[in-house]
Image (cartoon, rainbow, N blue to C red):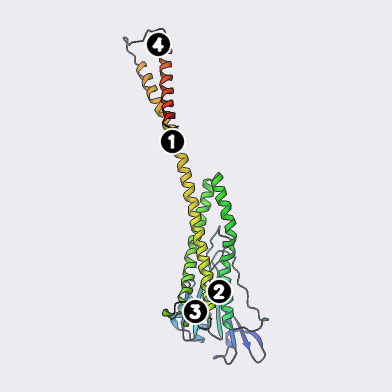
Amino acid sequence: MLILHLYNPETNSWHTGDINTLQLPLHGDQKAWIDLSAASFSEQQQVLNRFQIHPVIADDYLRERHPPKLEAYDGFTLLILRAFAGESFHEYPGHAQLSLLFSNQVLLFKCQLPEQTGHYKVQPFDVSKPVTPIKEWVKSYIHAVSASYLEKLINFEDELGDFEDAMLTHGDDHKMSRIMRLRSVFRKLDRNLAYQKEMFADLLTPDDGGIGVMSQFEAVELRDFYEKFERLHSMTQMYYDQLGDLVSSYMSTSSHQINERMKLLTMVSTVFIPLTFIVGVYGMNFDNMPELHMPMGYFWTLAGMASVALGMLLAFKIKRWW
């Protein structure tokens, strides 16, 4: 089911109806806002055909999953954005895809949430608000997408500090697994934000003709879009690297602890090797063995074994192996 809001400049009000009430082409200051989020595939095709959207652009708009994209043709601009749909970075249910197809008078809006329960909410259309240019709606959606990342990234800074303290004092495999899950989430975020940052960066390159794609926006607004996603991308990369540093630190600490334990076990084994040799020699069952009938032989042997052990431990201490 699609939702159509049509602005009538004569009555200065919005009217809600179905696609059959839409008379094309729109005249004067008429504007149409069409929500296709809950529309079927055939209904979406019907609307795109009514507006004579180019088949290539229509195909991209109809796809359920599509990387962020910006493309224009014959007065319509296609803008596909990805918002973070999770409640926090401890889970990644997927992304919310916002597909906007707009001109100076029309906005075709579609929000697709992941199959899992998405926490991302788009502000619904308010018919009581005064009419605004189409570009203002598009700007609000771009800001809403960036806000879906920004607030969570800012809050994650304190959580990352707690993680660092916890790993330094009493790190364990459970915390390690949580960090690895977070790194996986940030790797996906990095990919989404990189797409969108580069998409808006192209608008600032006159050689590519990017300004013409969204010519209704001023240069300062285009730069603001780019800087928002560039900042989000930088924060995501920084947190990803910091989580990687925590993993490396934990692995280095664990390796050092294992080396210390192996060092102790090696010294103990080294001390007992000559003692085992002495025990082996005097454990031989020969009739004519020297010292076999010495009254103090047992005690002299124990004293010799103790001297060997203490001498080796003293040598380890002198060489600072222990």
The answer to whether residue 39 of the structure is visible from this angle is no
- Residue tagged by mark 4? 297
Which quadrant would residue 273 be assigned to in this image?
top left
Task: Tell me the kind of residue under disc 4.
Answer: Gly
* Separation (CA) of disc 1 from disc 2: 57 Å
Q: Earlier in the sequence, mark 1 or mark 3?
A: 3
Extreme-front residue of the structure: 318
Q: Are marks 3 and 2 in contact (CB under 8 Å)?
A: no
Quarter of the image containing the C terminus? top left
Task: Tell me the kind of residue under disc 1.
Answer: Met
Q: Residue at x 59, y 82 (%)?
A: 33
Q: Residue at x 48, y 52 (%)?
A: 245
Q: Earlier in the sequence, mark 4 or mark 2?
A: 2
Task: Tell me the kind of residue under disc 2.
Answer: Ile
The answer to whether residue 147 of the structure is visible from this angle is yes
- Residue tagged by mark 2? 142
Judge left or right: residue 317 versus residue 33.
Answer: left
- Pinpoint residue 172: horizontal percent, then vertical percent: 53, 45
* Separation (CA) of disc 1 from disc 3: 62 Å
* Separation (CA) of disc 3 from disc 2: 13 Å
Where disc 2 sits, the SS reads helix
Where disc 3 sits, the SS reads strand
- Pinpoint residue 298: horizontal percent, then vertical percent: 42, 12
Q: Nearer the viewer, residue 279 or 40?
A: 279
Task: Tell me the kind of residue under disc 3.
Answer: Leu
- Residue tagged by mark 3? 78
Q: Earlier in the sequence, mark 1 or mark 4?
A: 1
- Residue tagged by mark 1? 262
> Within 10 Å of the Cα at label 2, are there few (<14), some (14-19), or many (20+) other Cα atoms?
many
Where disc 4 sits, the SS reads helix
